[in-house]
């Protein structure tokens, strides 16, 4: 069994300590670089700092010059993975496993599919063995939350590409003490043309102060988003949008 390479412990500029082996969250769209020789992970500008983070180990310290297997999970299935200079993976999966192939660096291109942009997530495990030897998960999910305050104009506070997931859940929690908000859940196949989802089509759903709306669907549309407007002009309401997109049917290898 060879050595396993993954994320190392890092203290973010905010003071939060991220432990070794934890997934990276808050990534904006752009290029993520994995340098296994130096053992570094470099995130796109706008992601949580520091942008360059350590892996748990590196090839230099081991006296090696390449890894030979890898598993990568990225929350957006429209991302493209460049393995070394020869293999490009754009097969619309959130998880990829490649065995018996030598490389020393990986580039992951994350598209601008998310609102907010900094809600992409990433996890990887690599090995210098030809076989990864790690049970890379077939069941996965992307979850997070977005908070805000409604305005007199309808605003999209959450928009996600959900290709490769098969369950979608969004809970809107009105945390305001007095004012209500109007919510619409919409779907799209191309990220440009949007349609109101069932239950939100004839009119927006009003979420009163201190209450919540929970939406769940297993209809596999390609994009979903949530838009919010104050129910009464001049009376903004605070809220939190919780989202969870689940993949429990896909394959993690090829």
Image (tube, helix red, strand yellow):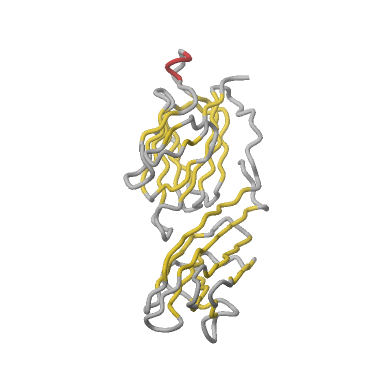
- Residue extending furthest toward the left: 45
Image location of residue 112, percent across then percent down: 39, 56
Work out whether 163 lies above or below 23: below
Image location of residue 60, percent across then percent down: 42, 17
Left or right, 118 with respect to 174, comes to left
Left or right, 232 with respect to 6, comes to left
Q: Nearer the viewer, residue 4 or 81?
A: 4
The quarter of the picture where the C terminus appears is top right
Task: Write the residue at 56% across / 25% down.
Answer: 4
The quarter of the picture where the N terminus appears is top right
Work out whether 82 lies above or below 195: above
Count how many numbered circles sit on residues in the image: 0
Work out whether 219 lies above or below 204: above
Task: Write the residue at 46% across / 37% down.
Answer: 87
Task: Write the residue at 55% across / 54% down.
Answer: 143
Image location of residue 122, percent across then percent down: 49, 43
């Amino acid at each position: 069994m060879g050595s396993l390479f993954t994320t190392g412990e890092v203290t973010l500029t905010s003071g939060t300590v991220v432990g070794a082996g934890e997934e990276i969250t808050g990534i904006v769209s752009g290029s993520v670089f994995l340098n296994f020789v130096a053992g570094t992970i470099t995130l796109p500008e706008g992601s949580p700092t520091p942008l360059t983070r350590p892996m748990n180990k590196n090839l230099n310290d081991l006296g090696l010059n390449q890894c030979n297997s890898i598993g990568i999970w990225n929350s957006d299935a429209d991302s493209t993975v460049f393995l070394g200079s020869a293999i490009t993976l754009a097969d619309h999966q959130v998880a990829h496993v490649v065995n018996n192939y030598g490389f020393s660096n990986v580039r992951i291109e994350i598209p601008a599919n998310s609102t907010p942009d900094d809600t992409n997530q990433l996890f990887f495990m690599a090995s210098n063995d030809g076989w990864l030897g790690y049970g890379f998960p077939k069941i996965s999910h992307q979850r997070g939350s977005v908070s805000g305050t409604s305005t007199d104009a309808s605003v999209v506070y959450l928009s996600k590409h959900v290709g490769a997931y098969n369950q979608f859940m969004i809970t809107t929690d009105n945390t305001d003490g007095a004012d209500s908000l109007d919510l619409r859940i919409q779907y799209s196949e191309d990220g440009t043309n949007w349609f109101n989802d069932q239950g939100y089509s004839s009119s927006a759903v009003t979420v009163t102060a201190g209450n919540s709306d929970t939406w769940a669907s297993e209809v596999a549309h390609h994009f979903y988003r949530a838009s919010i407007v104050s129910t009464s002009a001049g009376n903004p309401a605070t809220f939190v949008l919780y989202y969870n997109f689940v993949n429990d049917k896909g394959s993690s290898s090829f």
